[in-house]
Image: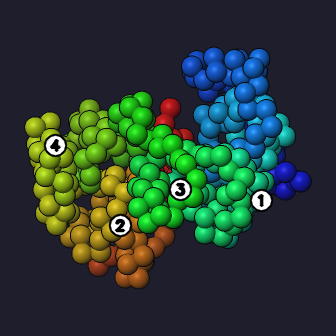
Amino acid sequence: DKGTHYEVKDMKLAEQGMLNLEIAESRMGALMKVKQRFAKEKPLKGIKIALALHVTKETGVLVRTLIAGGAEVAITGCNPLSTQDDVSAALAKEGVKVWAYKGETKEDYYRYLKNVIAFKPNITIDDGCDLVTEIHKNDPSQIKNIIGGCEETTTGVVRLLAMQKDGALKYPMIAVNNNKTKHLLDNFYGTGQSTLDGILRATNILFAGKNVVVCGYGSCGKGVALRAQGFGSNVIVTEVDAFSALQAVLDGYRVLPMVQAAKEGDIFITVTGNKNVIDLAHMKLMKSGSVLANAGHFDAEINLAALSKVAKIRKVRPFLDEYMLNGRKLYVCGEGRLVNLAAAEGHP
């Protein structure tokens, strides 16, 4: 559905979205206190805020809070598969400028970013650094209007640091991911639970007794490994950093190189922020029936581009694709995009 200030999947979903926003508000006490204060003090009056975030019910509560503080807000998604369509419809019904739907085409994704940039924001709120990158790359004239911004996720912070090193970052950014409540709590507890939630919704697989290979042992990987272990899985960790690998060993997990883990795993979960962590050579070694999922921000950790050239693909469940490779079946969750949002609802 399209309107003067929105483009969403279906406005008929707005009523359900309102209910989900109500549920989220009941569980977000700290932010609701901020909202109450904002409503009285209006600290953001006259400020335009552009957001490129996962459009979930929790993000919707943030949008409502910013508006309560007097801000004008425009929002789009930061991943083509992470939008909750009922929430985007509810925000549109409330008059929010919102361009987001689940399953966006590449063309729509970047068109929506342009719509948010055309809003001429004073503050940007980003997850993955696509909004900041687009402003610097394609519309640098907007930078003079921008006071600053913030970036939520590890991958986005890495991109910003690279821009800063090259002298390309032209306005100040706050690395939200560096906050202890983010990388030590949200990444660890939130990603751990929601990643397994996404895989369960995509596959309905039994984790108990399975060999679960966790690729990467940072804050997110630690959380994923702990929850998989809690489900009764035998956890194997792959990790290139020596200290993190040692931590995994001391936490009780086996640590193997990917080429060896590929032969033993039943479920593979990437949480590294790097490219081609699971490459075609690894997938050729995997058992038939293996499940692959990514919990990193971008869909580059599993080399599906290479796999697609040599495998026959069919969709077998809403968020599960089967790849037939040399007579063996590999199952990929959520098109290799971040599984906790592509196949589930993100962090609770």
Marks 4 and 2, Cα distance to the nearest angstrom? 22 Å
Kindly identify which residue carries mark 1. 118
Q: Nearest to the eye among marks 1 and 2: give it.
A: 1
96 horizontally vs 176: left or right:
right
Q: Is residue 219 above or below residue 143?
A: above
Q: What element does badge 2 sit on?
A: loop
Amino acid type at circle 2 is Lys
Circle nearer the N terminus (3, 4): 3
Residue occupying the point 80% across, 37% down: 46
Residue 18, picture quadrant? top right
Q: Amino acid at mark 3?
A: Cys
Among the two numbered marks 1 and 4 on one chain, the one whose residue lies closer to the N terminus: 1
Determine whether 295 is above or below 251 in the image. Answer: below
Q: Secondary structure at mark 3?
A: loop
The residue identified by callout 3 is 129
Badge 1 or badge 2: first in the primary sequence: 1
Reading the chain from its start, which is encountered first: label 4 or label 2? 4
> Which residue in the structure is indicated by mark 2?
275
Residue placed at 73% from the left, 32% from the top?
Answer: 44
